[in-house]
Every structure is written in C-alpha cells, then in structure tokens.
Image (cartoon, grey):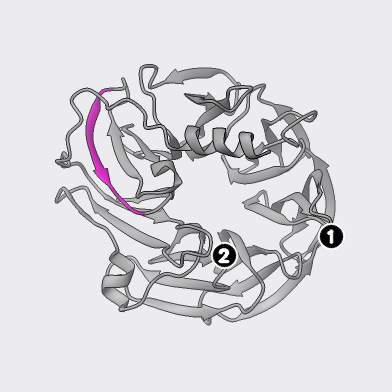
Amino acid sequence: MIALLATLAFAACEEPEPLPGSVDTIVPDNGTALILNEGNWGGNNASLSRLDLTAGTLENGWFASVNGRGLGDLAQDLVLYGSKAYVTVSESGSLEAVDTATGHAIHVDLGTRYPRYLAAFEGKLYISCYNPRSVIRIDTATLQVEASCQLGGYNPEGIAVVAGKLLVASSNISDEHGTFNYDDRLYVIDIATFSIDTTVTVGSNPQKVMAVDATHAVVNYLGNYGSLPDGSAIVDAATLTVSQIGLPLTNMSVSEGIIYGYSTVWAADYSGKTTSYISIDAATLSTTPLLPDVSLNAYAIARHPTNGNIYIATDGDFIANGDLLCFTPDGTLRWRREVGMLPSKIVFWL
C-alpha cells in the first residue's frame, strides 16, 4: 500500500508538457464567465474567478474581494439563474446567492445538510444533500427551504430538471468499515408533487447529471474502480429509456444539444494518465474528437455559447492553482491564465 501511495503521489506531481505558443494575454471575445474553484477539502479555499471576455480581464478571488469573506470549504456546484449565480459549498453547509453584476452575495446557512448539486426551475432551486440523503427545494425569492424529498440509502449527487421531473444520481455509500457500496440508479422525482415516481438504472456510481434538451439528460457514472466499468448514458425523461453512449466521461458540459467532455484513463500501475477530449451529439450518439494534440490534467470543460471556443481548466496536480485555457474549435491555443484551486466548473452568459 505504501508503494502504491508513493507511485500515486509521484504521478500526481507530474506536469504535462507546456503547450507551444502558450500566452497569458486574454484575447478579447464576447460575454462573461464565472469559474468555480472548488478548493481543497478542509482547506477553506474555495473561490470564484470572474472572466470579462469583452474587456479581456480575469479577476481571481472575485467573491472574496467584493464580499470581504471567503466562499468557504469545498465549493460543489454553480448554476446561473436569472440575475444570480447560485453556489453550493458542501463542507461549509451553505448556499451563496451571488449577484452576477456586482458580486454581492447573500449567504444561506444550510447547517449540516452537506449541499451538493444544484438545479433551477420556475423560481425554485433544487439541491441534493447528504444529510439527510434528500433533495431540498428553495424559493429563489425568499431563499428559504420550502420542502424536502427524502431519498434512499446512497449519497445523492448530480441533479437536473428534464420534462417536468428531477433526475437525481444515487451514487455510493461507505459502511462502518470504510467499504464502499455503489448504486446504479437515478431517482425520478415529480416536480409538481415533489415525491419520487420511480428510479431508472444507468450504470454503477452515477455522478453528474445535466439537461441536454427539454426531454433528455446526460449522466456519467464512475463504476466501482474495478469489476464494474465507468461510462455515460443519455436518459429520455419522458419514456425513462436509457441509451448508453459507449464511452466513459470523467467530466462534461452541454451546449446547444451537444455534450463536450473528456475521459481520463490511468495506467494499470498508476504511473501516469492520458486524457482525451470529445464531443457527442446527444440525438445520434455520434462522437467527434476534440483537441487531438492537447495533453492536460483537465478538471473542467466548457464551450463558448456563440463562437464555439473550447475552455479547459486544469487541476494544478491538486497542490497548486489550476489554469484556464482557451482553444479555438480547431484546437489552436488562444491564451492560458492561472485561476484558483481546483477549477471545477465554467459557466458563460452574454
């Protein structure tokens, strides 16, 4: 075990080769982006970076500079809804409602719920929580918890609103001996009644769930890191049918019905890893390689909504701040800048 840990530590510290022509001057574009930097577990160093593409400026620590306090311990998810950005901070047990224009935030104390992932629909926020294992509903006007839908015995993760339903990942749980057990389902919750209709099987250890269009969602599942494989699937919320994509996705985002993701595969002896990037047409499940000549320790991916530029955030080997890189659709690097610790999500608005 000690030898394995040493090997993993060595692999984690390996830096990818510098990209040719890497520059730190942001090439002006259109719109604004927020980068959610989740921070280290127990480090209390989560943050938000604000990227003004029109002006070509990046402000790290934007949340702290405006509000005079940090974001907290382990930022989990970020959604844009109306004029606000909503952020869950799991270890701090909080929700932040951030005005996108000014950065001023309203802090909501969620106690020991350990809030995870977010979805927004018709003036409400839906948040998956570990304690108790549930989905809570919050009114965006009052920021008060209105109701809770109790789930089963596994930790809930990703959540999405599709076809008037909430799809919630039921992932895993560890017992008193530290042994993990894995579920393979999504809960299907009727929004009108805020109760569980049924479940649908997708694959072992589902994690992130994202709406693709009005009736479909994409989910990635990580398997049990052994006998049960990782993968990804499309779920039709209207018919509750599941179409396997046929490849694993470590992380992903969705833009105009297309899934943009990457898959990280470790060597059998954990001596190194390779990451490949891909886009997937959710309607046909056809795939197209992205960034074929790029080697990065990716931690997030997103596509600019109008010009198709691809943004990749790197993990900083889990010991340093990550970088944000912008590529043209054909894979040419436009610029590269440092952001925060473990940048895990990138969202745009125009």
Query: Is residue 290 positioned above or below 111 on the image?
Result: above
Residue drawn where x is 41% and y is 55% of the image: 37
The answer to whether residue 107 is visible is yes
Q: Is residue 110 left or right of residue 9?
A: right
> Please, what secondary structure does the residue beneath circle 1 have?
loop
Relative to the observer, which residue lies in front, 56 or 45?
45
Residue drawn where x is 32% and y is 43% of the image: 323
User: Which amino acid is tagged 2?
Assistant: Glu
Mark sitting earlier along the chain (2/1): 2
Q: Is residue 192 left or right of residue 45?
A: right
Residue drawn where x is 67% and y is 79% of the image: 146
Give the residue number, with chain letter if any, for mark 1. Answer: 176
Q: Return the x and y of residue 27 as percentages of the image width and height.
A: 16, 39
- Dot 1: within a 10 Å radius of its alpha carbon, few (fewer than 14), some, or many (20 or more) residues? few
The answer to whether residue 165 is visible is no
Residue sitting farthest toward the front: 2
CA–CA distance in space, label 2 to label 1: 40 Å
Give the residue number, with chain letter if any, for mark 2. Answer: 122
Q: Main secondary structure of the magenta part?
A: strand
> Please, what secondary structure does the residue beneath circle 2 have?
loop
The residue range painted magenta reads: 332-340
User: Which amino acid is tagged 1?
Assistant: Glu
Disc on res. 217? none
| Residue 220 located within the stretch drawn in magenta | no
* Quadrant of image for the N terminus: top right
